[in-house]
Amino acid sequence: MKINVLLFWFVGFDLGEGRTYQKVAEHLAKMPGVARVVIIFPPEKMKEETYAKPLTIRRISKKLSIIRENEPVLPLLRSPYRLRIWINTMIRKNTLKNYLRFLGFRRHNTILWLFPPHPYLEEISRRVPHSLLVAHIVDNFEKSDDKWLKKYAASQYPRIQQKADMIITGSQFNQALFSAGRKDCYLFENAVDEIFIGEPSRLPHLEEGSGPKLGYVGTLSERTDISLLKYLAEKKPEWSILLAGHQHVRDNEIARLFELPNVEYYGHIPYEEVPRFLRALDVCMITHKNTEYCQSMSPLKLFQYMASGRPIVATSVDGLDSLKEYISVARTYEEFIQRIELILKTDTIQKSKARIDMARGETWERRICAMFERVKEHMNGKLYDEVTG
């Protein structure tokens, strides 16, 4: 029997940014034991006077599709509000149900793969018949400063521990939290795509005769230590600080950082261009604040940095233990500078090769294969219990 996977995420409608749910979906769709993978996003509210199709469907490949539900489906401006909402909701729900049935989704062959928290977790669990419910905890949003995420995480995480047939966590922090009282909680950290795996080489500034380039790739957000980046740039004006990623911080400190002459902010760069960006650097940085939220993460950038062959300097946060022998960890701002200075003097091609060789064993293909084996064990066990029970 081939398995169908309905994967639910709370934001975004595009693949190609390297997020965990995207990599899970892409690689599950390549598995011979998987019939189809459908990513579904929460309903998008349209203007009430407009008409929208109940579903917006994007087909990524033969086995992978993305669906967004739309509301309202019909304007119905003259009908009572409650009736209008009820009619639109029923149209949307029935359309999704019928479309999934058309694709071959049935209770006995369907896995519901949820990435909580999100406001439609309870609804989608009730609406979609499934044999197995997998909860995948990437970051612990209960520790986030985002009030919306924090609210849903606080209410949904306890219920997830009760209702999920199995739980996948991305960090040791989350593993310790969600494995309490159950044996079906598994640790699978993030991984890296093959396109990131480079060739061993010396640091670029040695070949070019230029000043060292230090880089950070990732969202500039509440978890990023902007003060540390500013400190580095001011203390070492001969170093270039290259930053790439979405900006979710809006304050005077980051504005002052961008004004410094040795800081270059590239904004978001396409996922497929990130490997080239990393290979142009001398040192890759993980400049996260040492908070519980950051401790709950398995940084995607860590594996991408490793695959580039470039040395890595990080602040003292959790989530780095599995690769700690390849990372230089600093506990203070001054030590961060000292670690970089030492690397610039002592890094070699042999060390670059060791980092790349380690990354070869941490690919998404291997990670998802191992993850899917666990899922199949639980699905087969549950079906056996239903037949024999």
Image (tube, rainbow, N blue to C red):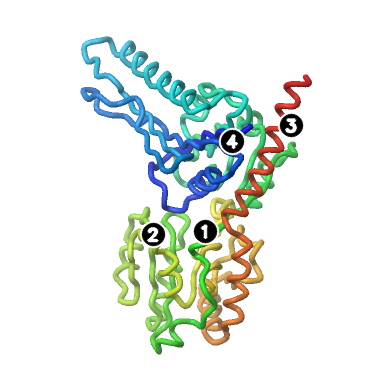
> Mark 3, mark 2: which one is toward the viewer?
3
Residue indicated by mark 1: 193
Which numbered disc, 4 or 1, marks the residue that appears first in the sequence?
Answer: 4
* Residue type, mark 4 in image: Tyr
Whole-number angstrom distance, CA of label 4 to CA of label 1:
30 Å
- List the residue tagged with mark 3: 381
Q: Residue at x 49, y 23 (%)?
A: 101
Mark 4 or 2, which is nearer the eye?
2
Residue position for label 2 = 245
Q: Quadrant of residue 74?
A: top left
Sequence order check, earlier mark of 1 and 3: 1
Q: Earlier in the sequence, mark 4 or mark 2?
A: 4
Mark 2 or 1: in front is 1
Q: Residues within 10 Å of mark 2 (few under 14, many from 20)?
A: some
**As rendered, which of 193 and 229 lies closer to the eye?**
193
Nearest to viewer (mark 4 / mark 3): 3
